[in-house]
């Protein structure tokens, strides 16, 4: 069966689009017109989301606390002929590594899991929340124990809802070394927990070792890195890399830039065969990620054309 294609909706709501986001209905109309099979939901304002994590949902853009509104969203997507390839949960305001009490994080994850269940989303993305500099403040074992303990519980919550959890490693978050990724994955040790492999992050983390604290851990190419993660990958993002990072407001490296296909250096003819062999997907989605790209809206069409070519060849 050929892979279905989607794109992350957050590309049109954060970064360069934060001050002028593109509403969800408009995004879906465009994706349908371009021949996408679905969308990967950034479940935070102004796109559909489970509600305000810090207070009342009144005036919280896109909040859908009521199951009835969630069912309506699912029905509209079905009428359009679009599906949800997954969801990025809004957990960035929570404490994960920098506290020994992850109750609030877990509660917010549960709320996102319930929302995903109601709208028919099977996969929930997580990350380490805190930046890699947290390793200067909290010892490795304590930090790892907090992440593993929390994600074990989240994976159980997701499993009860028939969902999987996918951890997106990035240069901009803690535990961004290849060895870290494997150790945490194996320590969580849940059948529905896996690694989200983004080909841009794969380049910046696995090949360039960007923002790694202490001694760098890298591989000669993504091929070797992907082989290292074989059997652990349960979700895939496909996009180019130009070996640079998106910059924060002060001009410092934050996380991987996500340039459209053709504006980077990646050799997808070597990457995609290895990635398809290494991944253990419970679904048939490949997703474009244009996070932080300045003209993501205009670049979407040509990225879809390139992804279609990759699907035809390797999917």
Image: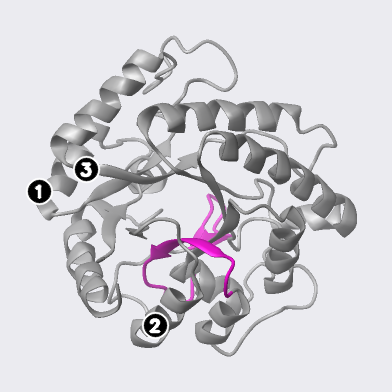
Is 194 located above or below residue 28 in the figure?
A: below
- What residue is shown with label 2? 273
User: Mark 3 or mark 2, which has the lower sequence index?
Assistant: 3
Is 127 located above or below residue 153 in the figure?
A: below
Q: Quadrant of residue 61?
A: top left
Question: Which one is in front, 191 or 311?
Answer: 191
> Which numbered circle lies on residue 33?
1
Q: Is residue 160 magenta?
A: no
Q: Quadrant of residue 224?
A: bottom right
Instruction: Please tell me how crowded label 2 is: few (under 14), some (14-19), or many (20+) other residues with Cα within 10 Å.
Output: some
Q: Is residue 252 magenta?
A: yes
Q: Secondary structure at mark 3?
A: loop
**Residue at 65%, 46% in the rendered image:** 129
Q: Secondary structure at mark 1?
A: helix
**Residue at 71%, 38% in the rendered image:** 153
Q: Mark 3 and mark 2: span between their CA atoms?
A: 27 Å
Q: Which residues are magenta?
A: 230-256
Query: In the picture, which quadrant includes the C terminus?
Result: bottom left
In the rendered image, is residue 265 in sight? no
- What residue is shown with label 3? 82
């Amino acid at each position: 069966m050929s892979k279905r294609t989607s794109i992350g909706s957050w590309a049109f709501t954060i970064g360069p689009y934060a001050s002028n986001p593109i509403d969800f209905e408009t995004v879906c109309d465009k994706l349908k017109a371009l021949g996408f099979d679905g969308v990967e939901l950034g479940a935070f304002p102004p796109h559909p989301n489970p509600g305000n994590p810090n207070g009342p949902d009144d005036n919280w853009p896109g909040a859908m606390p009521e199951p009835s509104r969630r069912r309506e969203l699912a029905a509209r997507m079905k009428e359009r002929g679009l599906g949800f390839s997954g969801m990025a949960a809004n957990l960035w305001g929570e404490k994960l590594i920098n506290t020994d009490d992850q109750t609030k994080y877990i509660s917010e994850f549960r709320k996102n899991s319930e929302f995903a269940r109601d709208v028919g989303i099977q996969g929930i993305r997580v990350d380490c929340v805190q930046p890699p500099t947290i390793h200067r403040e909290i010892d490795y074992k304590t930090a790892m124990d907090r992440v593993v303990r929390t994600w074990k519980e989240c994976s159980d919550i997701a499993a009860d809802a028939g969902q999987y959890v996918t951890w997106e490693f990035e240069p901009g978050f803690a535990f961004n070394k290849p060895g870290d990724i494997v150790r945490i994955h194996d320590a969580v040790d849940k059948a529905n927990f896996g690694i989200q492999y983004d080909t841009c992050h794969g380049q910046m983390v696995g090949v360039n070792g960007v923002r790694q604290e202490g001694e760098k851990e890298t591989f000669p190419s993504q091929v070797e890195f992907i082989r290292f993660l074989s059997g652990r990958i349960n979700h895939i993002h496909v996009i180019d890399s130009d070996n640079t990072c998106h910059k924060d407001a002060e001009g410092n490296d934050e996380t991987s830039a996500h340039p459209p296909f053709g504006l980077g250096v990646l050799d997808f003819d070597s990457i995609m065969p290895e990635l398809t062999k290494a991944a253990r997907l419970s679904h048939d989605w490949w997703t474009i990620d244009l996070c932080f790209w300045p003209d993501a809206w205009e670049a979407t069409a040509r990225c879809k054309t390139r992804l279609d070519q990759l699907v035809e060849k390797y999917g």
